Amino acid sequence: MIRLRAILLAAAMVVCGFAQEGTKPLETTLCQVVKQPDSFRGKLIEVRAMVDSGVQDLPVGVSDESCSAELKFLTPDEAHLARLLKSGEFRKLTKRLAKKPLVEATVTGLFVQEKNGPGLVLESVKDVVVKNAAK
């Protein structure tokens, strides 16, 4: 099972590599992706949502309270994470998450369906904005 996951994630990296060469992601909402996952499986998607933080304030996924949708981020290997960490927008995101828990961003990645649920092989981040807590 671990080997199958490694193969799927390696394939996702290849697809994401091709995505950098001009494939335009499908712009959609997180609610739509969670509602109809089969329509997005294996496709490069772009969503705008709240980013959830985890260990060392690294982003672990996105969520949308309006429809109770959540999608975890997947990083196939250390090289993939290292490439993300070189991105100015990704670094900006991690810095904002360290200071404020409410951060919204547009994220792009390959949508995959795994045994333990759907995930997004994160490819890029843009338009990072800190949100104020509702009073």
Image (cartoon, rainbow, N blue to C red):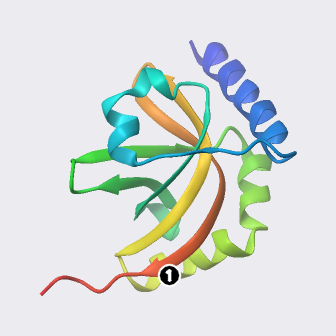
Of residue 134 and residue 7, the one placed in the foreground of this image is 134
Please state the horizontal and vertical placement of residue 17, each as a whole percent of the image.
82, 40
The residue most toward the left is: 135
Q: Residues within 10 Å of mark 1 (few under 14, many from 20)?
A: some
From the viewer's perspective, tell me whether residue 47 is left or right of residue 16: left
Residue type pointed to by label 1: Arg
Which image quadrant is residue 45 in? top right
Residue indicated by mark 1: 96
Measuring 62% from the left and 79% from the top, which residue is drawn there? 92
Measuring 21% from the left and 55% from the top, which residue is drawn there? 66
Measuring 66% from the left and 21% from the top, which residue is drawn there? 8
Which corner quadrant holds the C terminus?
A: bottom left
Measuring 44% from the left and 44% from the top, which residue is drawn there? 72
Please state the horizontal and vertical placement of residue 22, each as a whole percent of the image.
83, 46
Please state the horizontal and vertical placement of residue 69, each as a whole percent of the image.
29, 45
Please state the horizontal and vertical placement of residue 97, each as a whole percent of the image.
46, 76
Which element type, helix, strand or loop, lies under badge 1? helix
103 is higher (above) or lower (below) than 73: below
Label count reads: 1
The residue most toward the right is: 21
80 is higher (above) or lower (below) than 95: above
